[in-house]
Image: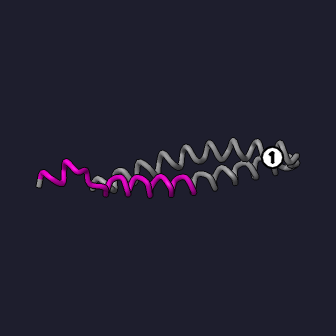
Amino acid sequence: MRAVGYGLVGLVLGSVGGFWVGLMIGLISTELASVSCFEGLCGYVAGGVGALGAVLCGLAGAGYGLRRGLRRDPAEAGAF
């Protein structure tokens, strides 16, 4: 049960952090590549990079949380 909790926390924190980092990378890349803002194209590009960052970092955070929750401490192993 602890692994599921850590996994969910990792998923949420990874998604939020990944979205904001991805959004900043998307904004910087649209400025450097001089993407046109006609009909909001630059916003769509930056938002797409932000969503991709949220998905990737959310999955990485969930994987890290699950692995951390499944890991056994040496002190706990000797107590049984």
Residue at x 58%, y 47% (from the top left corner): 18
* Image x and y of residue 8, in percent: 40, 52
Query: What secondary structure is the magenta-colored segment mainly?
Result: helix
With respect to residue 32, does 62 lie above or below? below
Q: Quadrant of the C terminus?
A: bottom left
* Image x and y of residue 35, in percent: 86, 49
Identify which amino acid the numbered label 1 is placed on: Thr
Q: Nearer the viewer, residue 40 or 54?
A: 54
Residue at x 63%, y 43% (from the top left corner): 21
Instruction: Classify residue 65 as left or right of residue 31.
Output: left
Instruction: Classify residue 29 as left or right of residue 66.
Output: right
Instruction: Classify residue 76 as left or right of residue 20.
Output: left
- The residue range painted magenta reads 56-79
Residue at x 50%, y 58% (from the top left corner): 59
Residue, disc 1 = 30
Q: Is residue 47 magenta?
A: no
Question: What kind of element bears circle 1?
Answer: helix
Residue at x 64%, y 56% (from the top left corner): 52
* Image x and y of residue 25, in percent: 71, 45
Q: Nearer the viewer, residue 61 or 50?
A: 61
Instruction: Classify residue 68 as left or right of residue 33.
Output: left
Q: Is residue 58 magenta?
A: yes
